[in-house]
Amino acid sequence: MVTINGKEIAAAVRSVLKEEVAALKAAHGLTPGLAVVLVGENPASKVYVRNKAKACAEVGIRSFQHLLHEKAAQEDILGLVRELNESKDVHGILVQMPLPPQIDSAAVLEAISPDKDADGFHPCNMGRLMAGMPSLQPCTPLGIMRLIEHTGTDISGKDAVVVGRSNIVGKPIALMLLARSATVTICHSKTADIAKRISGADIVIAALGRPEFIKGDWIKKGAVVIDVGINRLNDGRLVGDVEFGGASKRASFITPVPGGVGPMTIAMLLQNTVTAARLQAGITV
C-alpha cells in the first residue's frame, strides 16, 4: 500500500503554476486575479478563504476578498457578482458556500459568468462537462483525477465506484471517470448491497460524509481508494469516509484524511483561475 500524499502533489502543482503565472506577466503583462466572496462569519469558511488567499499569494495570483454581512440581501450579492463579472482585473470568481438561509445559492452561482466560474459549478460548465466539451471543471473532482493519475493507474477499462451523488463531487467525478473510459457505478443511500458493489471496484471514490462508513474488508485487493470525506469524531479526531486502517491493508494506493484530497482542491482552484485568465485574454500557448 502507498499513501497518496496530497500535500506534496498540490505543492508540485503550485510550483508549476507559479512559473506559469510569472511567464504570463512577463510575456503578456497579465496577472490572473481571483475574487472570493464571503457572506457572514462561518468559522470554517473564514479559514478556507484565508487559505485560498495564502495560496494565491504563493503562486502570484492577485486575490480580492469581499466580505459581506450575514444579513446581506440577495440583491447585494448579485450586484457584487455583476461588478466582478465586469472587472478586467478579476478572472475567477468564487462565492464561498454555504450561504445564509435568506440567499438563493443556485441563483448566485448562476449569476457568475461561466468564463469566470473558478469553482466550476455554473450550470453551463456542468453541462459542458457532461457533453465532454472543454470547460472550467469542479475543483475537488479535478484534484481527484490528478491524484489517480499520480498513481500511474490506467483508468481506461477500470471498474470505478463513486459513493455519493452530490453536484460538488459525486456527479462530476463520475463524468470525469466516464470520459476516461472507466465503467462507473454511482452508489448512494438507496443503493442495495453497497459492500458488494465496492468489493468489485478497481477505483473507489468515497464522498458521502459518513465517518468510516466504508469498511476495510469491502476493498478489493489492489484497488485505488480516494477518500473525500472529512469528519470530526467526538474525541476530536478527523477521519474520512473509509476505515483507513483496514482499507490500507488491501488498497494499492489510498489517500489519508487529512492531507489527501483537501490540498488538491485549492490547487485546482488556482489552476482554474490561471486557465480562465488565459482564455479571457485569448492566450492559447
Image (tube, rainbow, N blue to C red):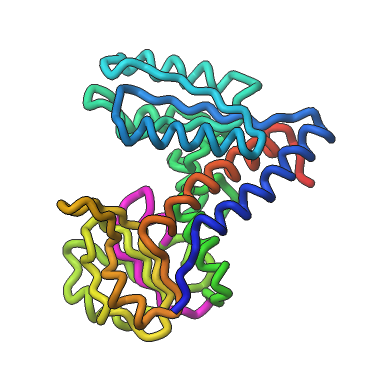
Quarter of the rendering containing residue 85: top right
State the residue lying farthest toward the right. 27
Q: Nearer the viewer, residue 235 or 252?
A: 235
Residue 180, position in %: x, y?
54, 68
Vertical side of 154 occupied by 176: above or below: above
Residue at 53% from the left image edge and 21% from the top image edge: 84
Q: Is residue 164 visible?
A: no
Residue 194, position in %: x, y?
22, 73
Q: Is residue 30 visible?
A: yes
Quarter of the rendering containing residue 24: top right
Count the marks: how many?
0
Q: Is residue 274 magenta?
A: no
Tell me if 162 is positioned left or right of 284 in this view. left
Q: Is residue 163 magenta?
A: yes
Tell me if 136 is positioned left or right of 169 in this view. right
State the residue lying farthest toward the front. 235
Residue at 48% from the left image edge and 28% from the top image edge: 36
Q: Nearer the viewer, residue 251 or 193?
A: 251
State the residue lying farthest toward the bottom. 221
Residue at 32% from the left image edge and 31% from the top image edge: 105
Residue 251, position in %: x, y?
39, 79
Residue 1, position in %: x, y?
44, 79
Residue at 74% from the left image edge and 30% from the top image edge: 30
Tell me if 155 is positioned left or right of 251 in this view. right
Residue bounds of the magenta highlight: 156-173
